[in-house]
């Protein structure tokens, strides 16, 4: 998807993985679409591997819901088959503040990194 705007983001990792073969196999056994998110450049964000991963790993939907409750977050989604979750904002300042609150809420030892999407592909 080609974006006209620039976005900032925060990617977090809980310290455990979601086995990709397991995620796809579980999805294939009960193919439920992931919850639709925000529409960017005419494409609605959605990850169909969220339902199986969220059912087995409750930390993932907890963090996604927490992100979506934050005022500066445009949307949040699990990345790929998991276990990373990311949030998008529209400014670096907002993302730095989000990161500080995330680490205060979920623990300072969790992996987190800032990223940018600059007028390009998401």
Image: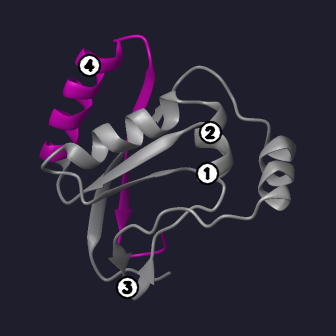
Look at the image and say whether residue 35 sits in the magenta stretch. Answer: no
Looking at the rendered structure, the secondary structure element under dot 1 is helix
Q: Residue furthest front?
A: 30
In this view, the mark in front (1 or 3): 1
| Callout 3–callout 2 Cβ contact below 8 Å | no
What number of labels is visible?
Answer: 4
Look at the image and say whether residue 109 sits in the magenta stretch. Answer: yes
| Callout 3–callout 4 Cβ contact below 8 Å | no
Q: Upstream in the sequence, badge 2 or badge 4? A: 2
Looking at the rendered structure, the secondary structure element under dot 4 is helix
In this view, the mark in front (3 or 4): 4
Q: Residue 105 carries which label?
A: 4
Which residue is located at x 58 percent, y 41 percent? 54
- Location of residue 102 by image quarter: top left
Q: Upstream in the sequence, badge 3 or badge 2? A: 3
Looking at the rendered structure, the secondary structure element under dot 3 is loop
Highlighted magenta segment, given as a residue range: 93-122
Q: Find the distance from the CA under tag 2 to the CA under tag 1.
A: 6 Å
Does residue 98 appear left or right of residue 37 in this picture?
left
Instruction: Please name the residue that numbered disc 1 is placed on.
Output: 51
Instruction: Please name the residue that numbered disc 2 is placed on.
Output: 55
Which residue is located at x 55 percent, y 38 percent? 84
Q: How crowded is mark 2: few (under 14 residues within 10 Å), some or many (20 or more)?
A: few
């Amino acid at each position: 998807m080609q974006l006209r705007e620039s976005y900032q983001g925060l990617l977090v990792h809980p310290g455990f993985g979601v086995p990709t073969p397991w995620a796809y196999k579980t999805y294939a056994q009960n193919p439920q679409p992931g919850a639709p998110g925000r529409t960017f450049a005419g494409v609605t964000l959605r990850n169909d591997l969220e339902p199986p991963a969220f059912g087995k790993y409750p930390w993932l939907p907890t963090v996604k819901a927490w992100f979506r409750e934050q005022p500066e977050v445009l949307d949040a989604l699990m990345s790929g088959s998991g276990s990373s979750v990311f949030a998008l904002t529209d400014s670096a300042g907002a993302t730095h503040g989000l990161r500080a609150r995330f680490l205060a809420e979920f623990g300072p030892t969790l992996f987190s990194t800032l990223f940018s999407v600059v007028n390009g592909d998401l």
